[in-house]
Image (spheres, grey):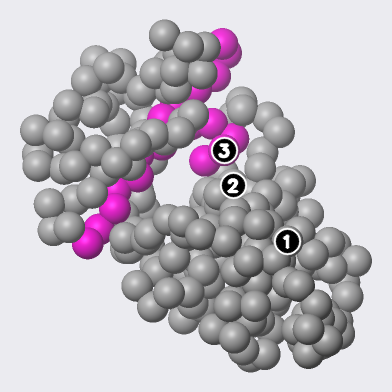
Amino acid sequence: MRAEEIIIEAHFDPGIKQFFLDKGYKYLGKGVDQMAFLEPDGNTVLKIYGTTPKGEYSGKLTAKHKSFKTFYDAIKRDPTNEFLPEIYDYKLFEFGELKNPYLEIRMERLSKFKKGAEGWDSLLANMSSNVKNDVPVNRYIKSLEDEIEKGQRVRYGLEKLIIHLGREGLTKMYKTIFNLYQLAKYNDYKLDLHYGNFMIDSDGNPVITDPFWVYDWGI
């Protein structure tokens, strides 16, 4: 077993995966501190976030959970924002002999964006940079339009995104990123927007799924 897999397994009770499989959930995959399942209805995703595996904070929720709570609180304040996922439920539950706490989140089912990673990365890198420098969004969007009008080669996916979202959509996307940046700065997180932290909803819009990076894995 690789070191990464050992770290992942350490965050979870060994029986938790089978517990959900027995209830008819479909296993989708896992990250360092989370597992994802598709609920029997086929439309809802259940994410389970694990606990700190060892040390003085063993068995407690990690600092990463705090960043997720910050994100989901932001979603509740802006429930109609198409660039934020829809969350149905957010709660804690205990599992296993040690009664360790886990974070349980039910959310809309999203799809991976399989093409145009270069275009997304280019867009997000520029947007993130502009957010940090507080560049007016209209100036940024105008520069993208100028690139296309001049016939310059735009990275795959970027022109399609501009056409799909339009000025109004790009403006709202920029404002969404700026608000997340403000939250990250206030909470001492790092804004962590890249291709892997975006998914696509049923309308074809990019949805931010995990915008913050936390330096400390402790409580």
Type of the residue with mark 1: Ser
Crowding at label 2, few (<14), some or many (≥20) Cα neighbours within 10 Å? many
Q: Give me the residue at 34% from left, 37% from top.
A: 29
CA neighbours of label 3 inside 10 A, class few (<14), some (14 to 19), many (20+): many
Helix, strand, or loop for circle 2? Answer: helix
- Please name the amino acid that badge 2 sits on: Ser
Report the residue marked by disc 3. 64
Q: Relative to 141, is 66 on the left or the right?
A: left
Q: Which numbered disc flags the more N-terminal residue, 1 or 2?
A: 2
Residue 108 x/y as whole percent: 33, 63
Q: Which mark is residue 67?
A: 2
Where residue 100 appears, x then y in whole percent? 35, 24
Please determine whether, in this image, residue 90 is positioned above or below residue 164. above
Q: Is 23 displayed left or right of 89 in the figure?
A: left
Part of the protein shown in magenta:
43-65
Q: Nearer the viewer, residue 149 or 129?
A: 149
Was residue 61 drawn as part of the magenta stretch in this picture? Answer: yes
Label 1: state its secondary structure: helix
Mark 2 and mark 3 in contact? Answer it, CB < 8 Å. Answer: yes
The residue located at (83%, 86%) in the rendering is 150
Choose the circle earlier in sequence order: 1 or 3: 3
Does the rendering let one see residue 137? no
Q: Position of residue 142 (x, y in %)?
A: 82, 87
Q: Which residue is mark 1?
A: 122
